Amino acid sequence: MADTILDTIEAKVVSADAPDPAVPLGLSGASLTTLATTLAGGLALAACSGGGGGAGTTAGGSPTPTPPATPTPTPIAAAAASRLLGQATMGATKGEIASVQSLGFDGWITAQFAQPRATSHWDWLVANGYNVAANINNTTGFDPTIWRQMIAEPDQLRQRVGIALSEMLVVGVDGLTLNWKQFAGAAYFDVLLDNAFGNFRNLMGAITTNAAMASFLTFLGNKKANTTTGAQPDENYARELMQLFTLGLYQLNPDGSVKTSGGKPLETYTPADVSGLARVFTGLNLASSVSTTPDRYRVPLVMTAAQHESGASSFLGTSIPMGTEGMAAVSLALDAIFAHPNVPPFVSKQLIQRMVTSNPSPAYVGRVAAVFANNGSGVRGDMKAVIRAILLDAEARDGTAVTSSNAGKLREPVLRLTGWARAFSASSPSNAWTIGDTSSSSTRLAQSIGHSATVFNFFRPGYTPANTAISTAGLVAPEFQITNELSVVAYINYMQALIANGTGDFKADYSAILTLAGDAQALIDEVNLVLANGQLSAATIAAIKGAVDSIANSGATGPSNRVMTAILLTMAAPDYLTFR
């Protein structure tokens, strides 16, 4: 597959309607359409080349006992350190690679847990003057603060987990029926980041009483049933809380495999469970009616007793007694869901998918789910323990996974951008961070954090591209849901311009890597290590080297053209795009 793409990768990646770069990359060869076709079609082959791997399970669906982790190698190779950072951060840097090598995998994770929380999105918006009347009905400021934290803040493990959670517990800022949308969205992301290293049960409570979530899933001001009009409580949040956030549609074994009866999957809940649970989520409202400032969106929702269903509510085998106070009823309902046996494997598998691999073995899911159920001290839902288990598991740290046909995942587009930005010290001196909404599939990345149009995210965890080797093998590839010829063309064009020129005053700093411009091999090795986590094949490296060597290292633009060519061709290669 790598040979196929590299035959066509030397293309001038500027379409007819793309802006002309100030610094041309000097490439020539096949058309962009050929490149896009090869990338979109060939990636499916690169992501799945055959049979399975991973540990097995017992007949009852429990994970086969295996060692919890591969012993940390001494010393840790730079590529192995970069690979961990590819899973646990928004992008590797030379400094973080050295830190992992010095502290070890477990030590680096511990150090990241100890990192103080970055300036909150809310406080940054206030400090930068976004709480002015002109912004009362727009999202101005939301994208700058999201990009800034992902790229610039040192609490990178928290940032990566927070983004993973945002793709599971989805709120889209454009779909909020609130004023001060940027502040409501910021407050929601602060909830995710504040709870990323806490307990999952606390996170469930925090999103349930968050204004943005209540607006996005339409339970803000939800009222009890009206016997006169026949109106019933809104069921949206009750359904998605179970289906998408905690349990899933089908009952699961501890290893995440689906329980069946007579060959058919067993459903987790029924419409009656949804209706019963919806009765609990009535009466939740904003804490203040003052709309001239955004402040009411930062505090939890409050209960309006007159709107809350005071009768008994039954769901999932649980019954909340008549007359239970509203917030107490919400807490009891969340406790019942949190205790459900589906929660550990359902949540654990999605976190693994977002951070390590799209198709974790049942044994991997089972090991992490067991830690979710009990961190070793009798605590359920300990996020630090779960994150550590995900990243230190043998399937995450075993370097042979790079060659496994089932391992890894397609790098989601946002992580490609942040990876480039962090690798090459991109910054915005004015603090404007003018990257903006990158969700256009025709001109940008087809993804932008916080801009999902629906609660289903830009891509579903169970998505598999039809009529591909991936689907034939029974595997999933979530990120392929936003990957096609159009989106690949847009990605290459967009990154070509961004690599060359930045946007506004948001630009990369190539001063360090420019010192390697005269040595093509050293240049590509550096890009491979920091940007591609050491995963470019020898054939890919040779082809990129040929392209770099075709550009003279002379004149005002020669060195920078060589550097940017190496970066762009790396970011277009399947070896980079299919992170393992």
Image (cartoon, rainbow, N blue to C red):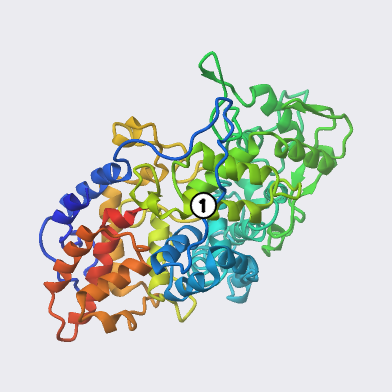
**Circle 1 sits on which residue?**
174
Q: Residue at position x 20%, y 48% from top?
A: 38
Identify the residue at the far top of this view: 262
- Of residue 270 and residue 550, the one placed in the foreground of this image is 550
Q: Position of residue 533 (x, y in %)?
A: 37, 63
Residue 217 visible, this angle = no
Q: Position of residue 556 (x, y in %)?
A: 18, 86
- Say whether residue 6 is left or right of residue 446: left
Residue 292, relative to residue 431: is it above or below?
above
- Say whether residue 43 is left or right of residue 95: left
Identify the residue at the far right of this view: 323
* Location of residue 325 (image quadrant): top right
Q: Position of residue 471 (x, y in %)?
A: 35, 33
* Location of residue 459 (image quadrant): top left
* Location of residue 520 (image quadrant): bottom left
Q: Amino acid at mark 1?
A: Asp
Q: Secondary structure at mark 1?
A: helix
- Say whether residue 369 is left or right of residue 516: right
Identify the residue at the far bottom of this view: 555
